[in-house]
Image (cartoon, helix red, strand yellow):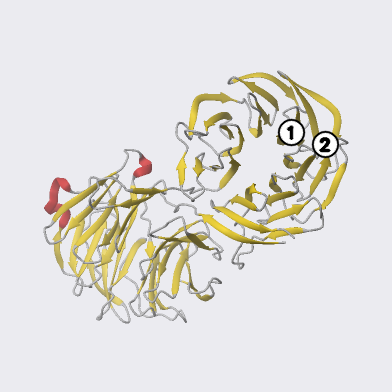
């Protein structure tokens, strides 16, 4: 039994309000890259649904940059480390790891020879370092700042020059190699968020929280002009977080907290296009990229906006989760719905494109999603139940309070059954019509395909069976008690003959629903809490996802056989980082999974 990874529906970039986000691009103009959690995500510019990931950082990654040669990527993390790794091979072999500063890396720049780097950020005694990519040896001193450095750029022509922009309102101009302080520029009256040399090295542009755009000579650092003062009312009305040059050196792209992005003509000294977004905080623009024909601006929400100079609004928007995915289900039309820690729910199409579910979503983490017919039901840590219309991908207006933290949800054609920490509730027509107390706190709930029987797994390691009779639940005498850990996941097989029960110790028992006897007890290879289990449509296989980062596919006919999709960072087709929070079968030979890395992955299985 083996598997291959079919696709990654990637997470969105991690963003922080008030901070610039750096997007990198490869020298061939084919890919762009960014970070989320401990991952570096590489996506195709022409088809951003094509993605790969690098997952070997031990701390949250913050920025990643391609070398001009295209052979390596340098990526930094919150602990001040920079990893330099090979991108020409799938194994992403590590070339070097360098401790740069004692804090978060905010930006990295390579020189044109792909030999030297400068990394900057939030240090203590120093805020940046220049070093060789292969040995880590110093090639100069990054000095002149008294606060965190937000951006760095290296002139790609000789004589080498470098510039850094800081929270101390200054830009430092450096000569190299070795790099040393030459000039401190104090034209900005706010945080300097971005510095960038033009592709031909003739000019340097700087932008900041003071809404200003300055141009300098790329060789001497002497001031040329302040573009924002010249265009006056056409300038940004909020902090400018990012700037990029056009490939022909004639235009600039800026992105701002005023929820706009602008293209500036350098020779004409005017704004030639303003791109508008919604008026919500989520559409503050905090990063950008101009690579060949592709123009991208990044929203605070993580939305990747593709721009066209001929259109004042985005021509394409790529969406995805920024936070850990905590809930997962598949609807009747094969749409995958995912809910995350920040309360957002996305609907994913088979091509990897995602749309946020319309209407008012949860205000806290989504606990579970369940589908039935043309609806998806969600429960969250805001103690509410909400319903999504699958056809229009939007929430209904009804919000049903649960009165306690919901732990799980099951759905019939006309009823919703909620397991909370206090009781089991039966909901019909947006109203709670029945509730029953449970001797032990519920941890999972499932309903059989005939919608006549409900199984509730509890913290006392027992599964209680309830009969659904019209408008009430009747507890049955049978209790399933083979598990030795708190019940955390439970699922009926599609044919209704089997009930799989997973627990906090990583063990899965399969019961015969008729006799209530254990049929399979060998499935115990997980080493931590099981978060999710799901059956194949033919009821012959079960997939499970766990806190141990692993996914297992089990065979009912051959209980000792299994497919193991490991969460090993050094493995090319690794599962998910931190944990696997949801799994489902798309068909008998295809599985999808979600995890704390905010990614959705699909796996093709080869059964024996």
Residue 592 marker: none
168 or 334, which is in the foreground?
Answer: 334
Q: Is residue 379 visible?
A: yes
- Residue 32: where, in percent of width, then height? 40, 62
> Where 373 sits versus 597, above or below?
above
The answer to whether the residues at label 2 and label 1 have Cβ atoms under 8 Å apart is yes
- SS at circle 2: loop
Q: Is residue 40 visible?
A: no
- Quarter of the view holding residue 109: bottom left
Q: Earlier in the sequence, mark 2 or mark 1?
A: 1
Residue 448 marker: 1
> Where 356 sits versus 61, above or below?
above
Q: Which residue is pictured at 35% across the width and 67% down the height?
A: 29
- Residue 436: where, in percent of width, then height? 74, 22
Q: Which residue is pictured at 58% across the width and 24% down the height?
A: 401
- Quarter of the view holding residue 157: bottom left
Q: In this view, does 4 lie to the left or right of 196?
A: right
Mark 2 highlights which residue? 513
- Residue 424: where, in percent of width, then height? 71, 27
- SS at circle 1: loop
Q: Which residue is pictured at 76% across the width and 33% down the height?
A: 455
User: Dot 2, how many residues are within 10 Å of its Cα: few (below 14), some (14-19), or many (20+)?
Assistant: some
């Amino acid at each position: 039994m083996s598997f291959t990874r079919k696709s990654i529906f990637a997470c969105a970039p991690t963003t922080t309000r008030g901070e610039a986000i750096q997007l990198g691009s490869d020298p061939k103009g084919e890919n762009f890259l960014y970070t989320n959690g401990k991952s570096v995500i590489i996506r195709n510019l022409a088809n951003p649904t094509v993605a790969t990931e690098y997952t070997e950082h031990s701390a949250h990654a913050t920025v990643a940059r391609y070398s001009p040669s295209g052979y390596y990527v340098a990526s930094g993390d919150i602990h001040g480390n920079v990893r330099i790794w090979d991108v020409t091979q799938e194994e992403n072999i590590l070339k070097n790891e360098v401790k740069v500063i004692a804090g978060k890396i905010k930006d990295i720049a390579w020189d044109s020879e792909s030999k030297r780097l400068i990394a900057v950020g939030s240090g203590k005694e120093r805020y940046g370092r220049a070093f060789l990519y292969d040995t880590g040896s110093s090639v100069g001193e990054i000095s002149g700042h008294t606060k965190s450095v937000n951006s760095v750029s290296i002139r790609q022509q000789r004589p080498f020059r470098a510039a850094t922009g800081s929270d101390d309102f200054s830009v430092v101009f450096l000569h190299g190699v070795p790099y040393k302080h030459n000039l401190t520029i104090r034209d900005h009256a706010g945080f300097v968020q971005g510095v960038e040399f033009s592709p031909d090295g003739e000019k340097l542009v700087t932008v900041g929280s003071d809404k200003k755009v300055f141009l300098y000579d790329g060789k001497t650092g002497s001031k040329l002009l302040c573009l924002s003062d010249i265009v006056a009312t056409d300038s940004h009305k909020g902090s400018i977080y990012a700037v990029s040059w056009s490939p022909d050196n004639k235009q600039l792209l800026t992105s701002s907290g005023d929820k706009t992005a602008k293209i500036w003509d350098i020779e004409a000294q005017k704004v030639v296009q303003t791109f508008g977004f919604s008026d919500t905080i989520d559409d503050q623009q905090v990063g950008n990229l101009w690579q060949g024909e592709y123009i991208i601006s990044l929203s605070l929400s993580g939305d990747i906006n593709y721009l066209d100079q001929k259109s004042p609004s985005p021509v394409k928007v790529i969406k995805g989760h920024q936070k850990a995915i905590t809930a997962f289900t598949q609807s009747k039309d094969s749409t995958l719905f995912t809910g995350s820690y920040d309360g957002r729910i996305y609907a994913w199409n088979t091509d990897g494109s995602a749309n946020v579910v319309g209407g008012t979503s949860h205000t806290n983490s989504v606990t579970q999603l369940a589908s039935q017919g043309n609806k998806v039901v969600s429960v969250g840590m805001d103690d509410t139940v909400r319903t999504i219309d699958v056809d229009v991908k939007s929430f209904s207006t009804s919000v049903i309070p649960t009165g306690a933290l919901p732990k799980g949800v099951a759905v019939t054609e006309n009823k919703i059954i909620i397991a909370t920490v206090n009781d089991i509730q039966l909901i019909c027509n947006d109203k709670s019509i029945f509730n029953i107390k449970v001797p032990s706190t519920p941890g999972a709930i499932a309903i059989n395909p005939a919608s006549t029987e409900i199984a509730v797994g509890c913290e006392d390691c027992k599964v209680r069976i309830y009969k659904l009779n019209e408008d009430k639940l009747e507890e049955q005498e049978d209790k399933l008690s083979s598990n030795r850990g708190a019940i955390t996941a439970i699922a009926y097989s599609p044919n209704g003959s089997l009930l799989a029960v997973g627990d906090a110790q990583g063990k899965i028992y399969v019961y015969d629903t008729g006799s209530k006897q254990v049929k399979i007890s060998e499935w115990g290879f997980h080493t931590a809490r099981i978060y999710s289990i799901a059956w194949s449509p033919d009821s012959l296989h079960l997939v499970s996802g766990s806190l141990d980062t692993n996914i297992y596919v089990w065979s009912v006919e051959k209980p000792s056989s299994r497919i193991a999709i490991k969460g090993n960072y050094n493995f090319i087709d690794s599962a998910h980082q931190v944990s696997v929070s949801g799994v489902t079968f798309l068909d008998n030979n295809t599985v999808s999974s979600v995890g704390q890395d905010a990614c959705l992955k699909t796996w093709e299985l080869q059964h024996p």
